[in-house]
Image (cartoon, rainbow, N blue to C red):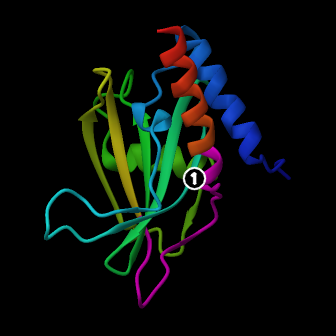
Amino acid sequence: MRKTANAKEKIALLELIRMNPEGFLPMPDHAWKEFPETDRGTEEYDDPQHNLGWDAGLLEGKRPYFMECWASCGITMLTYFISVKGIETAAKEDVTKLLTDAGLFRFYDPEHPRVNVMTFTDGSGNDFFSVNVTVGDEEDTYLEGGRMYSFKTLNAYNRKRNKEAENHG
């Protein structure tokens, strides 16, 4: 049985990755921002997004991931950010397999996973896969497993880190 980490252990991992970037593939800049409880978007037609939780860890050795759990319009999603470095040509199925092989979640119907994979470049110029996995909607649940932590803990850490950077910068 795997030991269950807590939020402090996950934040310690984020700090280790931040302090030793040459030892890990890039971590997306999403890991360093503060998440409001509700993000109303920038356009009046945007539906509010409710930020529910986060997770971070390592895949296949030293490939970090950062996950945001959020809900909007009656749908709950997990969005994983994974560096494309070394797996630039990976197909959607390959990227999804990285997550399921790591035991992050299990699809109830593996023949019909509700997953979308796209690439993006973060503010630091690093390329990532953004893997959107549907957890469920108002009528059904599509996967089980995973864990997440309160944004309250991560936001407090990032506020402190940002103040320290401002004082030393």
Q: Position of residue 15 (x, y in %)?
A: 64, 25
Q: Position of residue 164 (x, y in %)?
A: 58, 20
Left or right of 163 on screen, residue 74: left
Taking 116 as reference, is 62 above or below it? above
Q: Secondary structure at mark 1?
A: helix
Left or right of 119 on screen, residue 65: right
What residue span does the magenta drawing correspond to? 134-154
Determine the residue positioned at 36% across, 29% down: 84
Q: Amino acid at mark 1?
A: Phe
Determine the residue positioned at 60% across, 31% down: 160
Q: Which residue is mark 1?
A: 151
Q: Residues within 10 Å of mark 1 (few under 14, many from 20)?
A: many
In the foreground, 33 or 91: 33
Does 110 appear in magenta? no
Taking 84 as reference, is 168 above or below it? above
Determine the residue positioned at 28% across, 21% down: 125
Q: Position of residue 87 (x, y in %)?
A: 37, 28
In the foreground, 47 or 145: 47
